[in-house]
Image: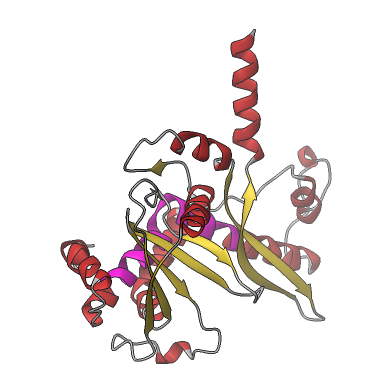
């Protein structure tokens, strides 16, 4: 984003010196919005709700007899049965949610810039913040419908964006009138917790500045995770209502692949 990258370093200095202005907010919020919608991780995560939406529509239309009878080659099963058995699958082109995200990137930037931010300063040189190919870690809160977002911006600086569910999204503009921030130093335990979330929310790659002895074992311990869309559905008389959130889940696919590779090496 040409309007973001040249101003990134200046925005970091403003965060560090507590001299935050609208340009600083716009730059950092724009960076977060871009990564969240257009990175490979964001494209994958945002594909799942669309897939579920198409599936629900298919079930509803099939129940109403909107589709022709299936061909004999499919065993006489209807579309609903084929989907539920896994014989056919709905696949979403990740470029589609990316396109939707790009179309809404300014709205998301305005929204993120109207939330509360915690500016987290890390003074531990031997324990800097990591980052990744999806540097938007999610953090559970007391509200099951709300997730904080933690974004590492530099080895010694990160922000925690705290959403406000009561905020009227129509008031989200680029004056950032609802913005508030608090700056504080984090302790070593908090640094470890944040780095754990960063590793577990990474898509494929974790980046770190210094190769301390503890770094690779720490990453290896937390690598078998990633963010997945979590959808809770409530069936009404008219249709199904979906509630979307995200959660960190264990990745059995690469864990099993790693164990298989290790076994092959032992043989």
Q: Specify whether residue 46 is painted magenta.
A: yes
Please give the name of the residue rendered at 39% of the width and 83% of the height, measured from the top-left corner: 114
**Magenta-drawn stretch, dominant element (helix, strand or loop):** helix
Would you say 155 lies left or right of 252 here?
Answer: left
Please give the name of the residue rendered at 43% of the width and 53% of the height, measured from the top-left corner: 134
Residue 2 appears anywhere in the view? no
Q: Is residue 166 above or below residue 254?
A: below
Point out the image quarter for the C terminus. top right
Point out the image quarter for the N terminus. bottom left
The quarter holding residue 54 reads bottom right
Q: Specify whether residue 151 is painted magenta.
A: no
Residue 58 appears anywhere in the view? yes
The quarter holding residue 161 reads bottom left
Instruction: Tell me residue 9's x, y (percent).
Output: 19, 62
Instruction: Tell me residue 32's x, y (percent).
Output: 37, 65
Instruction: Tell me residue 160's x, y (percent).
Output: 44, 69
Please give the name of the residue rendered at 43% of the width and 90% of the height, measured from the top-left corner: 170
- The count of marks equals 0
Please give the name of the residue rendered at 39% of the width and 90% of the height, measured from the top-left corner: 178
Magenta residue span: 27-49
The image's colouring method is secondary structure
């Amino acid at each position: 984003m040409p309007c973001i990258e040249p101003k990134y370093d200046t925005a970091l200095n403003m965060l560090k010196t507590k001299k935050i202005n609208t340009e600083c907010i716009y730059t950092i919020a724009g960076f977060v919005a871009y990564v969240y919608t257009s990175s490979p991780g964001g494209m994958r995560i945002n594909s799942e709700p669309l897939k579920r939406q198409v599936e629900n529509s298919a079930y509803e239309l099939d129940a109403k007899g909107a589709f022709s009878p299936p061909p004999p080659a499919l065993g006489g099963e209807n579309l609903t049965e084929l989907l539920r058995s896994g014989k056919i699958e709905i696949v979403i082109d990740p470029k589609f949610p990316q396109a939707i995200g790009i179309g809404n990137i300014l709205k998301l930037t305005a929204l993120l810039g109207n939330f509360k931010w915690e500016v987290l300063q890390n003074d531990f040189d031997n324990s800097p913040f990591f980052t990744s190919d999806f540097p938007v870690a999610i953090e559970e809160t007391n509200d099951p419908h709300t997730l904080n977002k933690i974004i590492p911006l530099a080895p010694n600086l990160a922000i925690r964006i705290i959403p406000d569910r009561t905020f009227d999204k129509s008031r989200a503009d680029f004056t950032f009138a609802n913005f508030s921030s608090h700056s504080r130093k984090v302790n070593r335990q908090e640094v470890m917790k944040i780095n754990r979330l960063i590793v577990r929310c990474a898509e494929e790659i974790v980046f770190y500045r210094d190769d301390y002895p503890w770094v690779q074992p720490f990453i290896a311990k937390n690598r078998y995770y990633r963010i997945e869309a979590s959808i809770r559905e409530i069936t009404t008389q008219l249709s199904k209502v979906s509630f979307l959130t995200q959660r960190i889940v264990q990745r059995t696919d690469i864990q099993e692949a790693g164990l298989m590779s290790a076994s092959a090496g032992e043989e």
